[in-house]
Structure formats: C-alpha cells, structure tokens
Image (cartoon, helix red, strand yellow):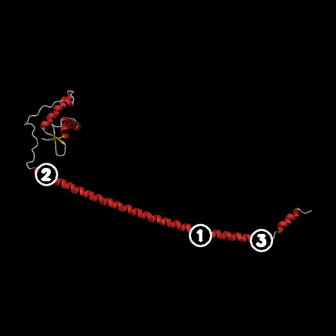
Amino acid sequence: MMYSTKEAAQLLQVSPTTIKRWASHFQHRFSKDELGHYVFEESDMEKLAFIKQQLELKLSLSQIDLPEEKPAARQSKPLPADTGQASDAHASSFTRMTAQYGEIEKRLRHVENKLTEKADDIVCLQLLEHRRELEEISRTVRQLSQHMEEVACSLADMHKQTEAREREQPPTKRRRLLASLFSF
C-alpha cells in the first residue's frame, strides 16, 4: 500500500512538515511520484517509524543511521515497457499545455483590446463634455460682455442727461444764499 505525506504523518502522529523534513534529509531513501510529492510504501513507513523512535531518544537527524534495505524489500516502480508511450504522453501533454497557453494569450489580448477601446471611448466622451462646457462658458462670456456694453451705454446716457439738467438750472439760488450771508 502507498501512503501520501499526509497519511504517513497521521499514522506516525507527526505533522506533514516533519515527514517532509525527514524525507528530504534522507532523500535517496524515499521516492517521489511524477508530480514531485513523496510517496511511502510499507518499508518506508518502517523507516519513518525508526526515525521517529531515534528522535525520541534525543538523537539528531544527522546522527541517525538508517539500516540498509534488503534488495527484495525495496522494489522500485517498474519502468514502462515502451518508453515511446511515455514520450508520446509527454508530447501530447505539452501540446495540450501549449494550446491552452495560446488560448489564454488570445483571451488576454482580446481583454486588452476591449480595455483600450473602453479607455478611448471614455476619453472621447470626456472631450465632448469639455467641449460643451467650453461652448457654454463662451456663450456666457458673450452674454456678459453684451450686458456690460448695454450698462455702459445706459450709464453714459444718464451722465449726459445729468449734465444737461445741471446746465439748464440757473445758479441763482447759490448767489442769493451767498449774498444774504455777506450783505452789509
């Protein structure tokens, strides 16, 4: 029976990190699967139990000397009879991954293009809005200028009318007032 790191840790009542540390210290004694994860057989479990026992006796990992395995006890995984099948599997896996990568790249370009289009649309809308605001400001300035001219004209007319009234009135009242003050 094969055990994963987690299962081995549960059986030995230690953490999976501890199992990984032990396996990496004695890396040539424990095998890994195709994904690089440690897998443990019954004989490996006996080795791990031995390591745990030695550590409980206050030995360090470097002081532990694992017993040599019996040739029959440790059977390596049989190699595929046809290595061509393995290379075909790797090639098809590589082809699939390349196709997936191409698809992801295509989607990414599509999203980037959409994002660029949206940014351009937003800039165009902002420019149109600014143009409308500038036209409104220009119209307001023209109206204010026209109103100022009208006010200036009416002020000039009022000033002329005031001057004309002052010319029409005789200054006699002033003379009488002054004459009454200085009469001897």
Farthest right residue in view: 184
Horizontally, residue 49 falls left or right of residue 184, namely left
- The residue shown at (37%, 62%) is 118
Q: Earlier in the sequence, mark 2 or mark 1?
A: 2
Q: Position of residue 49 (x, y in %)?
A: 16, 33
Write down the residue under mark 1.
146
Looking at the image, tell me whether mark 2 or mark 3 is earlier in sequence order: 2
> Which label was assigned to residue 167?
3
Left of 126 or right of it: where is 22? left
**C-alpha gap between disc 2 and disc 3:** 118 Å
For label 2, the crowd category at 10 Å Cα-Cα, with few meaning under 14, some 14 to 19 and many 20 or more, is: few
Q: Residues within 10 Å of mark 1 (few under 14, many from 20)?
A: few
Depicted 108 relative to depicted 168: above or below: above
Check the picture and name the quadrant holding the N terminus: top left
Mark in the foreground, 2 or 1: 2
x, y (%) of residue 125? 42, 64
**Which residue in the protein does label 2 denote?**
87
Q: Quadrant of the C terminus?
A: bottom right
Disc 2, SS? helix
**Residue type highlighted by circle 1:** Gln
Residue 114 x %, y %: 33, 61
- The residue mark sitting in front, 2 or 3, is 2
Res. 170 image quadrant: bottom right
Proximity of marks 3 and 1: CB atoms separated by less than 8 Å: no
Give, as a three-letter code, the residue at label 3: Arg
Name the residue: 61% across, 67% down: 148
